[in-house]
């Protein structure tokens, strides 16, 4: 009985040992299969082209980028460019933000400068040979051979305006009441026709042609305009001296003032009216931009100003002309534009 029991016990032990061995083999095979599958999946993911990431994921990334990051993002490939089409990149659009400087010659090569990011180079073909006459809320108003158009330089969004009456501009400045996509946008372009008269050209959104107004202000009484902006139905123009001119869009009439520094509790503009903004002179020079940009003394720069929206009182950076200390034949002429970066997307068939 004992022997028999022993034989039965040994047999069961051998059976159990065999089962354990088989089970270990099965577990080992399962582990190896799992590893094989994992490696296979990892290798398939690793082999997927980086330019073939899901569009939804790329769009979510693009929506969270700053303007410079977005510009780099769009250059990667066509797939990434397409994914960025819904991005707006308006992080820099909050109030109280200093404008950036867009510096260029007469071609399409531009340098974008902000102190916190340094220099960033852009190629903007639409700006080649064009003169910027207004900058506001990320939109530029450009003039080129009787052609005037809006341009967002960062997204290349462009809106053409009706043919302008003059093939050339001289010391003209412009302003627009709101972004060109707004139904109530009004554009004004002002400049001298002769020593006696100013010519003001006005265009409402949807108009097919410009309307011209002649304002009789002698050049001795109203000098070269260095500031143009809009506020509550009036266009404001300031000259190099203390002259100020308003043009009421509804009444189609102009009024000349003299800008005086207000006493405590007084007004900026006369005894009953004050400027809705603070004019800022010599912004380029006060910020030592030549030194920051590494420009030499043989460089002359003309700048186009812009309105800086502040919490208390908006500030308008005037147009400036910084002359070279060298002879004219050795002078390098550059153009600067103060701009708040935006990234506007508009339909391809967008019309004025």
Image (spheres, rainbow, N blue to C red):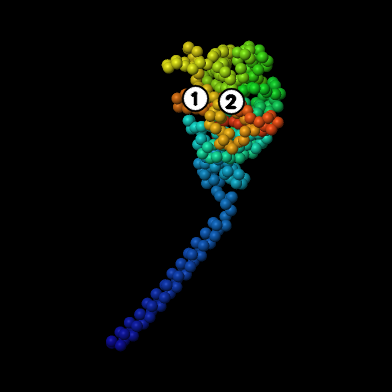
* Residue 27 drawn at (x, y percent): 43, 69
Q: Is residue 178 visible?
A: no
Quadrant in which the C terminus is drawn:
top right
Q: Which residue is mark 2?
A: 319
Q: Position of residue 247 (x, y in %)?
A: 57, 16
The answer to which quarter of the image holds residue 242 is top right
Asked if residue 263 lies left or right of residue 345, the reply is left
Secondary structure beneath dot 2 equals loop
The kind of secondary structure element at disc 1 is strand
Q: Position of residue 296 (x, y in %)?
A: 62, 35
Residue picked out by circle 1: 314
Mark 1 crowdedness (10 Å alpha carbons): few <14, some 14-19, many ≥20: some
Identify the residue at horizontal 61%, vertical 17% (top origin). Answer: 223
Closest to the observer: 261 or 83? 261
Of pointers 2 and 1, the one earlier in the residue sequence: 1
Residue 23 visible within the image: yes
């Amino acid at each position: 009985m004992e022997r028999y029991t022993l034989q039965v016990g040994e047999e069961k032990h051998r059976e159990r040992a065999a089962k354990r061995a088989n089970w270990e083999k099965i577990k080992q095979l399962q582990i190896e299969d799992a590893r094989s599958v994992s490696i296979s999946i990892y290798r398939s993911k690793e082999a997927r082209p980086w330019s073939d990431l899901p569009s939804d994921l790329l769009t979510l990334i693009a929506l969270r980028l700053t303007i410079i990051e977005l510009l780099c993002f769009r250059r990667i490939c066509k797939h990434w460019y397409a994914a960025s089409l819904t991005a707006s990149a308006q992080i820099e659009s909050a109030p109280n933000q200093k404008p950036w400087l867009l510096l260029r010659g007469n071609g399409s090569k531009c340098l974008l400068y902000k102190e916190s990011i340094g220099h960033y180079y852009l190629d903007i073909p639409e700006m080649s040979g064009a003169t910027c006459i207004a900058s506001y809320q990320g939109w530029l108003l450009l003039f080129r051979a009787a052609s005037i158009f809006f341009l967002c330089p960062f997204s290349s969004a462009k809106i053409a305006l009706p043919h302008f009456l003059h093939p050339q501009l001289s010391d003209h400045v412009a302003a627009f009441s709101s972004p060109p996509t707004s139904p109530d946008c009004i554009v004004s372009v002002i400049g001298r026709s002769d020593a006696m008269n100013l010519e003001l050209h006005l265009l409402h959104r949807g108009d097919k042609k410009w309307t011209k107004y002649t304002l009789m202000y002698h050049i001795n009484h109203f000098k070269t305009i260095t500031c143009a902006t809009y506020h509550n139905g009036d266009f404001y123009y300031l000259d190099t001296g203390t002259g100020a001119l308003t043009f009421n869009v509804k009444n189609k009439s102009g009024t000349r003032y003299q800008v005086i520094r207000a006493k405590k509790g007084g007004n900026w503009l006369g005894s009953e009216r004050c400027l809705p903004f603070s004019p800022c002179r010599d912004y380029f020079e006060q910020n030592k931009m030549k030194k920051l940009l590494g420009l030499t003394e043989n460089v002359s720069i003309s700048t186009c100003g812009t309105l800086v929206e502040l919490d208390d009182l908006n500030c308008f950076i005037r147009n400036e002309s910084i002359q070279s200390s060298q002879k004219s034949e050795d002078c390098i002429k550059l153009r600067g534009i103060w701009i708040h970066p935006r990234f506007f997307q508009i339909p391809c068939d967008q019309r004025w």
